């Protein structure tokens, strides 16, 4: 495990912010790593299983996966041209920027990659063509995204939005220091340096450019940044586990009999923290129903609600957790 030390000035603090949402090209690249994880995190298993059970989607992903396997191997480096800043404005904007990558840059970053991993012969041959094959790469990544990411938008976007609302709440309430403090334990803030758990040891001097923190569903374990320190500074970080969707396990019949099947599902959905819209999505009920059941559960002392900026998180209380863990007990014991 390495350490990334990000050096701030007063100007950098004023220019540090949280991105409006996940970056589609970063998510595309990072999802490729989740496919090869040996220890499958529970949150990603339904996503991966859905892919493997769909031959049509796997077929559409194939070309993009071939490119990503070559360009983003298990190594401490992959080319920055895969994740252009323009992708913050959407996938199409990012792909257009990718297509416009100069051949000289393509070859240079491929040479950097060769220091860490072997370059497949087919990719090396493409690099020798008169024009860089960026259009082919962009098309392959567009197909990969359409098969692997887009079908799970309803799963990914609320999770990312929940984490972002939580971080922005810290930013609004306590400034940038509150925002950076919310990133513990993967980051430790002590002015003027933010220490970040990272894959290698690095130093990054912001020099007044500020830092954009980008929440990611597919980032795991440690944050990741661009390799070139001259590019606009970004830090892609894994969203808090409490916001990631995991299938709501069916609670026992005794809990359902005590508080009702729907209310029991809403109670279970609050595990790890969830906004009211998250409760509705996880429990499979309408937003109005989730709000109504959350109110009853809150008044019963089974959940509590905490405001984090514009978002309100619903969390299990010890009483609520105890009811789920020991369903045979009565509420007053």
Image: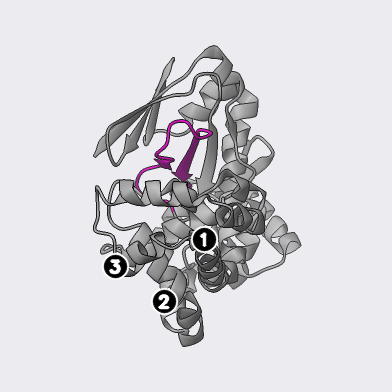
Instruction: Specify the label residue 258 is tagged with.
Output: none
Position above or below: 62 against 326: below
The N terminus lies in which quarter of the figure?
top left
For residue 248, above or below residue 302: below
Dot 2: what SS?
helix
| Highlighted magenta segment, given as a residue range | 219-239
- Where disc 1 sits, the SS reads helix
Identify the mark nearer the N-term, 3 or 2. 2
N-terminal of the two: label 3 or label 1? 3
Alpha-carbon span between mark 2 and mark 1: 30 Å
Give the image location of residue 247, x and y in percent.
48, 68
Residue 333 makes an appearance in the image: no
Q: Main secondary structure of the magenta part?
A: loop
Q: Residue furthest front?
A: 130
From the top left corner, tell me how far across and down residue 183 is, in percent. 45, 34
Colour logic = one colour
Q: Nearer the viewer, residue 192 or 156?
A: 192
Name the residue located 57 percent from the left edge and 67 percent from the top edge: 142
Mark 1 highlights which residue? 134
Secondary structure under tag 3 reads: helix
Q: Point out residue 241 in the picture as x, y percentages from the top left corner.
A: 44, 50
Q: Which residue is mark 3?
A: 121
Q: Categorize mark 3 by other alpha carbons within 10 Å: few (<14), some (14-19), many (20+).
A: few
Mark in front: 2 vs 1: 1
Q: Which mark is residue 49?
A: 2
> Dot 2 surroundings within 10 Å: few (below 14), some, or many (20 or more)?
few
């Amino acid at each position: 495990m390495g350490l990334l030390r990000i050096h701030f000035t007063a100007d950098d603090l004023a220019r540090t912010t949280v991105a409006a949402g996940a970056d589609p090209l970063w998510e595309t690249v990072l999802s490729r790593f989740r496919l090869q994880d040996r220890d499958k995190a529970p949150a990603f298993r339904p996503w991966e299983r859905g892919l493997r059970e769909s031959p049509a989607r796997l077929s559409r992903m194939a070309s993009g996966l071939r490119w990503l396997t070559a360009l983003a191997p298990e190594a401490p480096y992959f080319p920055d041209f895969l994740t252009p800043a323009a992708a913050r404005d959407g996938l199409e904007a990012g792909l257009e920027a990718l297509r416009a990558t100069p051949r000289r840059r393509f070859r240079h970053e491929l040479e950097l990659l060769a220091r860490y991993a072997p370059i497949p012969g087919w990719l090396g041959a493409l690099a020798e063509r008169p024009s860089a094959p960026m259009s082919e790469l962009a098309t392959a990544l567009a197909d990969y995204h359409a098969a692997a990411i887009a079908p799970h938008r309803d799963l990914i976007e609320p999770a990312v939005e929940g984490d972002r609302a939580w971080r922005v709440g810290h930013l609004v309430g306590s400034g940038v220091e509150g925002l950076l403090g919310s990133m513990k334990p993967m980051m430790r803030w002590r002015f003027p340096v933010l220490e970040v758990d990272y894959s290698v040891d690095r130093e990054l001097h912001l020099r007044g450019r500020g830092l954009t923190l980008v929440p990611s569903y597919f980032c795991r374990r440690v944050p990741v940044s661009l390799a070139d320190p001259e590019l606009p500074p970004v830090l892609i970080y894994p969203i808090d586990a409490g916001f990631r969707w995991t299938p709501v396990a069916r609670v026992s019949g005794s809990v359902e009999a005590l508080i009702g099947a729907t209310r029991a599902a809403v109670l279970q959905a609050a595990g790890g923290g969830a906004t009211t819209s998250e409760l509705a999505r996880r429990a499979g009920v309408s937003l109005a129903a989730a709000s109504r059941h959350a109110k009853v559960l809150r008044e019963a002392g089974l959940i509590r609600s905490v405001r984090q900026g514009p978002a309100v998180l619903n969390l299990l209380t010890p009483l609520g957790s105890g009811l789920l863990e020991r369903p045979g007990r009565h509420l007053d014991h």
